[in-house]
Amino acid sequence: MSLIRRIGSLLVFAILLGCGSDTVLRPPGGLNYSVAVSQCGPADGPAVAIFLTNDPVQKPNPSPPYVRIYIDLSNSALDGRQRSVAGSNAEAAAWFQLGIGPSVAADDGFVVASESGGTIDGSVDLVFPQAGHIVGAFHAPLFPNQALCP
């Protein structure tokens, strides 16, 4: 077998091994449920909050612990692009709410989200000072609320 074929075979094997991983497209550890909620942005335009939670969500503001991801765009504008949640070029934000008290902002990471048929699907790779590294996918139904922005 030629060197090029060996390298090609190894590359295909590595891709298949990665695709068969148990961590691909799974919810972040312990945060098996999610919901998306329409909100008002800082300029009174449309925005969306995505909550990743331990328990099924029955109201627009879940009980802690949860991760809240905020994107200053309407649901329909979510296009599957990767958006940073930290730094001067952040296009989104994320906070970890452990319990009663202040939430903790993500130090680093990104969110990918797209809307289709009343749900927002995506993934997160977030780093929090106390909560650590949270990585996984979500399938967040849109909560039936109407954000009335002035």
Image (cartoon, rainbow, N blue to C red):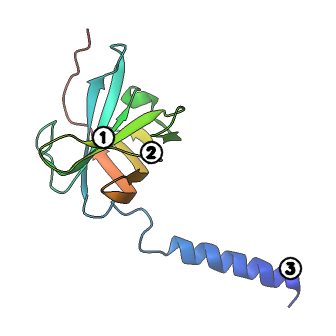
In the rendered structure, which disc, 3 or 2, sits on the residue that comes first in sequence?
Answer: 3
Please give left or right for residue 67 compared with residue 62 in the image.
Answer: right
Quick check: can you spot residue 32? Answer: yes
Q: Position of residue 3 (x, y in %)?
A: 87, 84
- Viewer-side residue, 57 vs 94: 94
> Label 3: few (<14), some or many (≥20) within 10 Å?
few
The residue at which mark 2 appears reads as: 111
Helix, strand or loop for disc 1: strand
The amino acid marked with disc number 3 is Ile
Q: Is residue 89 above or below residue 4?
A: above
Q: In the rendered structure, find residue 50 and report the number of the disc placed on it.
A: 1
Residue 75, numbered circle: none
Image spot of residue 117 (x, y percent): 35, 39
Tag 2 secondary structure: strand
Residue matched to label 3: 4
Q: Is residue 16 left or right of residue 29?
A: right
**Mark 2 vs 1: CB contact within 8 A:** yes
Measure the C-alpha gap from mark 3 to mark 2.
37 Å
Mark 2 residue crowding within 10 angstroms, few (<14) / some (14–19) / many (20+): many
- Per the model, the C-alpha gap separating discs 3 and 1 is 46 Å
